[in-house]
Amino acid sequence: MIPSCYDKNGAVIDFYTIFNLPRTARTDDIKRAFRELIKRYHPDTAAAGSKNLTEKLDLIVRGYRILTDEDMRIEYDRVLFNYRQVDSAGSAIISKKRIKYSATLGNMLKANLTPRGMKRIDILNNFGQDIEILVYPIEAAKGAVAYIDLPARMICPLCRGGRPQEEKKCYVCRGLGRIHTTSQLEVRIPPHVDDSTFIDVDLMHIRPDRLITFNLRRIRIKITVTGSRH
């Protein structure tokens, strides 16, 4: 499972361009570029007036996670350089444009944290679900797969959780040992679903990788059949 590599419009993000590195870059080069970018966009060191620092930092961290992990990088390169509409098992991949987040969950993703005072029951009471996935009739009949972005916490990739004597040295996590990020959840939509289908996912026992945990305990997904694509 790789971190989200898609932007808000569903396009694949080119992390090689963001890191100003060639596709053949070595791990040491990626780590060096990561440190330089973190220093440039961290609130404590960024130039006055810099905008969208949180979003830029999240992109940098996601890119670092993907490009420094051999398996993730192989999968990412496959997506970036050979865009697919089906996964390795032959299931249709739902477009990001057909994944609809509740307003509150959408805000959580933008802020990379849980709004203060907001409980999950408030989301369900107001929206009925955390996420709605729009599927075409053929996908409803045969099944499909969706990749959903969710807010998550990550052990700081620079200080690896931080040690007391290093807390003041880590300019990434400020000594907290963890940072907010976004990670991707793979959701398999079974065959023969309809508009009455809900998928409940327990996130307590799902970890995107050994450094990541999701912020939410569980999510509820509503399936809506739309359109007439065959």
Image (cartoon, rainbow, N blue to C red):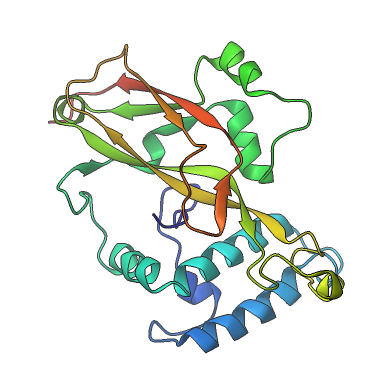
Quarter of the C terminus within the rendering: top left
Q: Is residue 81 left or right of residue 52?
A: left
Residue 110 placement (x, y as % from top left) = 64, 43
Q: Is residue 4 visible?
A: yes
Q: Is residue 52 visible?
A: no
Relative vertical location of residue 202 with respect to residue 82 in this rendering, above or below: above
Relative vertical location of residue 140 with respect to residue 76 in this rendering, above or below: above
Q: How many marks?
A: 0
Task: Indicate the quadrant where residue 126 lies.
Answer: top right
Q: Is residue 12 left or right of residue 111?
A: left
Quarter of the N terminus within the rendering: bottom left
Residue 140 placement (x, y as % from top left) = 20, 25
Residue drawn at (44%, 54%) of the image: 6
Q: Is residue 16 left or right of residue 103?
A: left
Residue drawn at (17%, 21%) of the image: 192
Residue 189 placement (x, y as % from top left) = 27, 31
Residue drawn at (49%, 53%) of the image: 7
Residue drawn at (37%, 29%) of the image: 133
Task: Indicate the quadrant where residue 35 lies.
Answer: bottom right
Q: Nearer the viewer, residue 24 or 73?
A: 73
Residue 86 placement (x, y as % from top left) = 20, 49
